[in-house]
Image (cartoon, grey):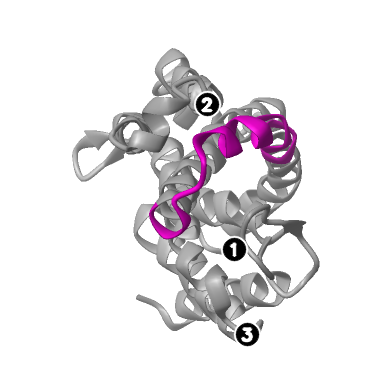
Amino acid sequence: MKTRSLTLLAVLAAVYAVASLLPGFPMIGVPSSKIDLARVLEMGFGFALGPYLGPPTAFLGALVGKTLGGGGFGLFFTPLALVSSLVAACLSRRQVRGVDGWKIAAAVLALLILGWYATPTGRAVPYVPIIHVAGLVIILAFRGMLAEYLGGGDRRLLTLGVALSCYPSTMAGHMLGNLIFIQMFSPDPLFFASVLPIAIIERLVLTAIGTAIAVPLLVVVRQLYPELD
């Protein structure tokens, strides 16, 4: 890999780490933890850097950021950055190692949703993943069109493609977070039902901000680093 590309990855990981130190949403049920606003960067990293570089860059940034912030329970949730960025990256590529990118993204989200129903807690409140299923429906409805939108030169279609891809990507990370939360804290199933409205608002906000950041990031990176496209 070219030195300037490695420099870009290091800079973006550092940006994520610094952004993770900013105030975020309080993580209900997890003492002294928060949902970082840096989450909005994960999808942009995936779109711009692709499935091989985007996820590790986001994960490294999350790991460094949480470590600098004092660690704690938040360290256990750093893999969320990896998953959200991976889904976004796959949706932005027509193919990944000979497989349609959208199929990989759909498989990842579907497996996470199935993971919910594999737990007693999840089966007790089977309607909670409806917001995640909505993300899966978006992927299955648009399929390869998302990569076309993201890869085209039309700014309006690019923005639409980013928005449509950001939602299922952030929902993948959210579901992984739910599964980790269940394993760590064994919460009452009704806990997830009570915070469902909050989760909907939170993820829509992350999708909106993530779209606003990812579009210009994607445009700039494509112009300066065409080898990463």
Is residue 48 placed above or below 127 in the rendered structure?
below
Q: Which residue is mark 1?
A: 224
User: Which residue type carries mark 3?
Assistant: Gly
Residue 117, horizontal then vertical, whole percent: 33, 30
Are the residues tagged 2 and 1 within 8 Å (C-beta)? no
Classify mark 3: residues with Cα within 10 Å, few (<14), some (14-19) or many (20+): few
Residue 189, horizontal then vertical, whole percent: 50, 35
In the displayed structure, does residue 182 sit left or right of residue 14?
left
- Residue 194 on the magenta segment: yes
Classify mark 1: residues with Cα within 10 Å, few (<14), some (14-19) or many (20+): few
Q: Which residue is mark 2?
A: 128
In the displayed structure, does residue 87 sit left or right of residue 17?
left
SS class, disc 1: helix
Callout in the foreground (2, 1)? 2
Q: Which residue: 44% across, 24% down?
A: 136
Mark sitting earlier along the chain (3/2): 3
Label drawn at residue 70: 3
In the displayed structure, does residue 129 sit left or right of residue 32?
left
SS class, disc 3: loop
Residue 143, horizontal then vertical, whole percent: 40, 21
In the image, which residues are magenta?
183-203
Mark sitting earlier along the chain (3/1): 3
Label 3 vs label 1: CA separation? 35 Å
Q: Which residue: 49% across, 50% down?
A: 177
Q: Tell me, yes or no, if residue 105 can be seen here.
A: no
